[in-house]
Amino acid sequence: MNADKAIQNTVSSLTNPAPSLSLVVILSLGTFIVFFQGFMVAPILPQLSSLFGVSVRHVSFIEPAYLLSYGFSTLIYAPLSDKYGRFPVIIFSISGFILMTACTGFAGTINQMMVLRLLTGLIAGGVAPTTIGWIGDSFPYQKRGHALGVFFGFMAGGTAFGSSSGALLTAFLGWQMLFWIVAVMGLLILAILLINYKKFGQQKSGNPFGFKNTIIAYKDIIVLPRGWRTYMFVLFNSMFHSGVFAWAGYFFFKNYHLSEKGVGLALLGYGIPGLLLGPFLGKLADKYGRNRIIPIGICVGAFSAFLFGMNLSLFFSGILVATLSLGFDMTHPLFAAIITTLSKQKGVAVGLFAFVMFMGYGLGSLVFSLIINIGLNESFKLFGFIAIIGAVVSAFTFKNVK
């Protein structure tokens, strides 16, 4: 297997120009806009509840509708990218994403919005996992953490700016204009991708695509002890972060009586650690080992959520938004780097990673919606306490992982 990897890396280096981080940035723009749209509705749940005449809890289900459908679709797009190439899949998904996002701006009821968000997730599912697959193809494991740090920095940035800008733009322009602006941003990103398409090459494994072959490939990864353990933590970590962040906007609205603009500003700190520290954290993991950074990252997120539940001052809660983001940046990119080593079919391994991650995103926000009756602050504390237990378990699970 090591010989096969060496041959594959040699062939790749001879047939493709050495990738630069600028190409990672360009590809990551697609993930940025997908996550921007994915989380921009979270802080405007109270406003949508009032406009559509339904409860906040009812409106909150538009988040898992998008995230769960996105997760399911990654199981199809990832192996397709192995066979036909990463770039065509990304372009198809971005194009469909733009169309469905524009259509969502015309939704007349909350149920129509749920359906459109579900369809958007199904079409957009080829963007993030395929980009990770391209990074896995292009960068050796010893340098992969740095590139993935850049990618996940854009992912965190999309989440943060989507949440903050969503609240700010809705306050001034209305929620419909918010979706149309995102569609225009998507068009600009699509143009940038098409202009630079020759630089990305056409990495593909040529493996036959079919239901049976795909299931076998997924099974081969899951049966690996290192595989299923990592995917379990991807699911756990995704559920934790999605549940907490999906309700963070409502937390600031309810506890501090902030307007949409105020909520947007409060959530702005979520993407700052990823954008500023993502590459540095990736290098740190490459140098000192993922086994050391992952447990610390889970702890940082856990204490952030638990302290949210303490209902401290507005200023301190705003700081906790940034530390919650830091916890994500210290864990998820590292999981992705581990995943890319589980199979020669990186598209399949990454597709399963994206599926598990988005299932976690959807289930996390769904679980939080279901337990919210125990109290908002109590729900944050419960999520934080469970994450602390997860951090302890992760120290033993990844002790031999570098």
Image (tube, helix red, strand yellow):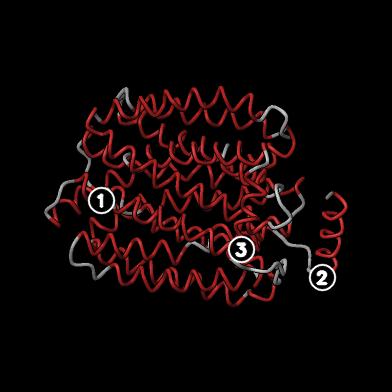
Residue drawn 41% across and 42% down?
242
Which residue position is annotated with label 3?
79
The percent position of residue 46, horizontal first and vertical second, equals 20, 47
The residue sitting at the front extreme is 212
Mark earlier in primary sequence (2, 3): 2
Q: Name the front one of labels 1 and 3.
A: 3
Mark earlier in primary sequence (2, 1): 2
The percent position of residue 190, horizontal first and vertical second, equals 51, 73
* Res. 319 image quadrant: top left
Crowding at dot 3, Cα within 10 Å, few <14 / some 14-19 / many 20+, comes out as many
Instruction: Answer above or below: position of 340 versus 290.
Output: below
Q: Name the front one of labels 2 and 1.
A: 2
Which residue position is annotated with label 1?
44
Which residue position is annotated with label 2?
15
Residue drawn 68% across and 47% down?
146
Marks 2,1: beta carbons within 8 A: no
The percent position of residue 51, horizontal first and vertical second, equals 14, 56
Q: How many marks?
A: 3
Instruction: Answer above or below: position of 364 versus 92.
Output: above
Q: Quadrant of the C terminus?
A: top right
Amino acid at dot 2 = Thr
**Mark pair 2, 3: CA separation:** 22 Å
* Residue nearest the viewer, comparing 390 with 172: 390
